[in-house]
Image (cartoon, helix red, strand yellow):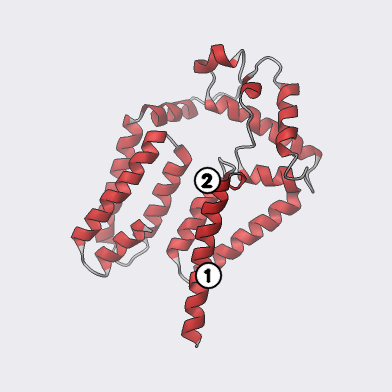
């Protein structure tokens, strides 16, 4: 929303001073994503911000702010040990699972290794109930059972209980292929609605959610459900109301 505001201040109102002040707030939010080392939210934010900035007839002016966002993002990635280390791990990716006692081997157990085990058990369980799933209340128990049976040489998955860390996998586990198809259909409906209204902030919001669904169970947490349902309803019904007023 703030990026969209910056675009309007530059293109419509020619108020560069106000656009600069709003940019400082945006960079403050980028800073906090930098501090917590959240890779997917960090780069999802960059992608949707660039989408909004370049979605205008005046490419030159918005390119300046786009360049600033990219430059700051690159700087944060290079200087932030947590993000830089994670990219290094991805570059030298090795498909392996955690080994040994978690408390003793914590420095040597990577986030990627833990996720390998999570996704392995997720797909193994999906194979057994591909169409209807296990129900929302039994997913974590099924995953934990797989962790206990498969990874007997480590207590990593006993010390911390992990969910599927992917919203799409979670829906497949809980509702099967049928549930996932219905879920994706609803999201495509919202996306088409936003595109029909040329509501680029709404499109950006949906794309941002789509990307982050790949790495976190956002809808398994209260704060995730509230965040998604509140803003999705706000964007959706805002333009419905505007249409009704224009028709009347």
Q: Determine if residue 97 is in view.
A: no
User: Which residue occupies the extreme left position in the image?
Assistant: 17
Which of 94 and 9 lies nearest the eye of the viewer? 9
Considering only vertical position in the picture, is 221 above or below 58? above
Label 1 sits on residue:
237
Residue at image coords 30%, 65%: 8
Q: Secondary structure at mark 1?
A: helix
Q: What residue appears at the point 49 percent right and 52 percent down from the top-left corner?
A: 208
* Residue 48, percent from left and from top: 42, 53
Tell me the residue that label 2 is attached to: 212
Q: In this rendering, is residue 109 above or below 27? A: above
State the image coordinates of residue 2 (x, y, percent, origin top left): 34, 57
Q: Position of residue 26 (x, y in %)?
A: 32, 50
Q: Tell me the residue at 37%/27% (across/down).
A: 81
55 or 142, which lies in front? Answer: 142
Mark 2 lies on a secondary structure that is: helix
- Please give the name of the residue rendered at 56% of the width and 14% of the height, measured from the top-left corner: 103
Question: Are the two marked residues, 1 and 2, in contact with CB atoms closer than 8 angstroms?
Answer: no
* Quarter containing the N terminus: bottom left
Up-down relation of residue 69 to residue 75 (above or below): below
Tell me which label, 1 or 2, sits earlier in the chain: 2
Determine the image quadrant of residue 158.
Answer: top right
Q: Quadrant of residue 186?
A: bottom right
């Amino acid at each position: 929303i703030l990026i969209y505001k910056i675009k309007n201040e530059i293109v419509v109102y020619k108020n560069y001073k106000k656009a600069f002040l709003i940019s400082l707030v945006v960079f403050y939010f980028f800073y906090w994503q930098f501090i917590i080392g959240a890779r997917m939210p960090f780069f999802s934010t960059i992608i949707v911000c660039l989408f909004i900035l370049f979605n205008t007839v005046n490419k030159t002016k918005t390119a300046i702010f786009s360049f600033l966002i990219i430059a700051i993002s690159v700087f944060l990635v290079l200087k932030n040990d947590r993000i830089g280390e994670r990219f290094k791990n991805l570059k030298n990716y090795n498909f392996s699972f955690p080994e040994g006692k978690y408390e003793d081997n914590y420095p040597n157990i990577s986030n990627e290794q833990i996720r390998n085990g999570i996704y392995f058990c997720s797909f193994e369980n999906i194979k057994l109930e591909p169409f209807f799933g296990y129900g929302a209340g039994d997913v974590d128990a099924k995953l934990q059972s797989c962790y206990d049976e498969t990874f007997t040489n480590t207590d990593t998955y006993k010390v911390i209980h992990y969910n599927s860390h992917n919203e799409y996998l979670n829906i497949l586990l809980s509702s099967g292929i049928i549930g996932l198809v219905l879920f994706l259909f609803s999201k495509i409906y919202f996306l088409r609605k936003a595109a029909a209204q040329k509501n680029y902030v709404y499109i950006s919001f949906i794309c941002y959610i789509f990307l982050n669904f790949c790495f976190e169970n956002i809808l398994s947490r209260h704060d995730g459900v509230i965040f998604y349902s509140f803003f999705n309803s706000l964007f959706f019904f805002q333009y419905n109301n505007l249409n009704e007023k224009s028709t009347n």
